[in-house]
Amino acid sequence: MTTERVSAEAGNAAAPAARRIPTERTHHGDTFIDEYAWLADKDNPETIAYLTAENAYTEAATAGQAALRDEIFGEIKARTKETDLSVPSRKGGWWYYARTVAGQQYAVHCRREVRPGDTGPPMTEDGAALDGEEVLLDGNELAGDGKFFRLGAFATSPDGSWLAYSTDFAGNERYTLRIKDLATGTVLPDEIPDTYYGLAWSLDGSALFYVTVNAAWRPYRVWRHIVGTAAADDVIVFEEADERFVLGVGLTRSERYLQIAAMSTLTSEVWLLDAAQPAGEFSVVMPRRQGVEYSVDHQIGADGTDRLLILHNDNAENFELAVAPLADPAASTPLIGHRADTRLVDVDAFADYLAVYYRRDGLTGLRIIRGDGTEHEIAFGEPVYEMHPGSNPEYYSGKFRLGYVSLVTPNSVYDCDMATGELGLLRRQPVLARPDGREYDPADYEQHREWATAGDSTQIPISLVCRKGARRDGSAPCLLYGYGSYEISIDPGFSISRLSLLDRGFSFAIAHVRGGGEMGRHWYDEGKLLRKANTFTDFIACAEHLVSQGWTAPSRLVARGGSAGGLLMGAVANLAPQDFGGIVAQVPFVDALTSILDPSLPLTVTEWEEWGDPLHDPKAYEYIKSYSPYENIGDLTYPPILAITSLNDTRVLYREPAKWIAKLQAAGHGGPFLLKTEMAAGHGGRSGRYDAWHEEAFVLAWIASTAGAAAA
């Protein structure tokens, strides 16, 4: 479907006209008139009425895509093994796993005792329940008839007798924490509301440590709860006063030490406590120093003494790995020195091995270090791929569980023998036949690594997948995805739903723009603060490269991004609207300056080191205002835009895309501009898997229609 037809179809319905109520915002001598600031009032019935009207307009404007949506949903459902079983992970005397059942929205979390004949993880061919399994939690029972359900924390005590878990029924990421006695199946009266992610058990399972947030949604307190007591009796064991820092709590892999991590964008600090002494005092590993980040794991050395593995960036931009005595962390010595071409990401300590996760040349990698100091790196053969650590709860293990995936290889689970480096495939995600019976064959697709040239001559990597033999004459549609913030890398992974685009002639590409972490720490540094614009111009360079190389044409190129990637979408819409035939912005951070100016909002102060502090710094204010999408809507002809948000999102508030779309609609140039608000969801959208498939089918049908894709 052409852009003109999309516009005509939308033209059969009238876009809502949000009221304009001028509100002045003045900072550093600059006044901005915000005509849609009133939409920030979630309790105003007029706000809800406007969102409801936008939903009705979007439904009417996309009514002609209903059959295609149903078709794509059917393809996703048919290709997915609905009754399935994850690869069990061993911890102590139990195998832990999750399984799904056809027709049910949520996973069932289970365990089964380790048996003498188990030579590896027990599995079933049909994905059915394991013989002798114990159901720990059934997400479907917990969710009931509610419109939203999400499981937050999920952790068994070290001896396997207790399960701590938390639930969210609104999407606002305020979780209620509960404890289940696994011997009796009874949920204890202990109930702790308004908790955050992360928790840790004491060694004997008598105490549970958890995190809560303040009014600005900053995780700032760690509490100790004694099992069987009232939440009112819980004790604060750590409170972070610096508003730039957030807290996390967990255990070292050895489960010998509880750790609290205080983290800002640029600085970190770790505190440890003997997990056998939960009533004791935490002690700092290394006091925080501005600009120094570090993380810690614990290992018992060959001589029986405790040592710390410290991954840090002190005079090491891409981080180095050091070892230090537990009693004297400052007396550290390098184990893996800094390399300009390799970003060390994480380390997992086992009794006799270290597994080091890294990035090099835009790809992920794994290095195993044996107890005798010898080491090897695990090689993977595809041109683009992602390797990531899997579930490895067992400290005394000689195997490292990892996940492997590429743009054509479905999610695969391996055990790596750390002594030999040998990889053993445990499971590859099944991809079933389409409704028409066509089977999935990776050989029907091809993947590429392309390089675009940015305006400053920087080479920007692009990962791309398409049907084998795809035309490169500019006639094919293409979806280009981007993110580019927080040093988060968008790695080339597999997607069943994406096949519905590829089989309709699309290519799919990921622009690995600056601001992400694909090419090392410098890649991140060059796409943040006063260099944030590199993220946007890199993405435009990638779009123009795909056109110049014949992969697509501007009218058939759709851009997609979410959250901070939604900011990217809004920015490129203002900078180069002519380069795109459509834009999808999901939970988009498009009113960035307004949000970052307000320290009472969730995440604002903690993110000043990422974006700049426009409240106190005139230079930061001027720079952010120069690219913030909402402020920069101009007298331009914009491509069709689909914005998706959630009413209960606490990370990017619904008001940002609501104001953005209202202003675009009022400007009246190009479009259509559509807003779809989930009225009972949060930042991640709808929670049930079938609901999520329907949502993805909605987006993919819009993309396919906008780009004029052929039938599958």
Image: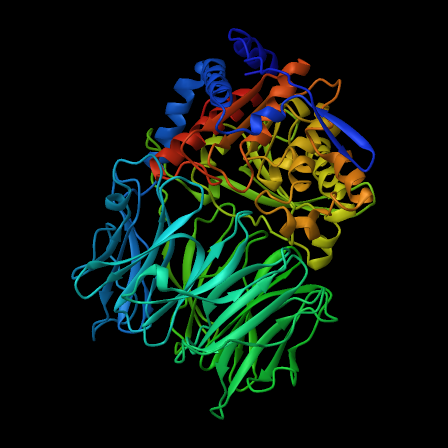
590 vs 192, left or right, is right
Res. 581 image quadrant: top right
- In the image as oriented, which residue stretches furthest toward the bottom? 303
Res. 262 image quadrant: bottom right
Res. 550 in view: no
Q: Position of residue 424 (x, y in %)?
A: 40, 66
Q: Which image quadrant: the N terminus?
A: top right
Res. 288 in view: yes
Task: Report the front residue among 257 and 527.
Answer: 257
672 vs 399, left or right, is right
Task: Report the front residue among 506 and 671.
Answer: 671
Q: Position of residue 384 (x, y in %)?
A: 58, 51
Q: Is residue 398 above or below residue 171?
A: below
598 vs 501, left or right, is right
Q: Is residue 469 above or below residue 285?
A: above
Q: Which image quadrant: the C terminus?
A: top left
Q: Is residue 495 above or below residue 579?
A: below
- In the image as oriented, which residue stretches furthest toward the front? 232
Res. 441 image quadrant: top left
Write the residue at 75% across / 29% down. Answer: 575
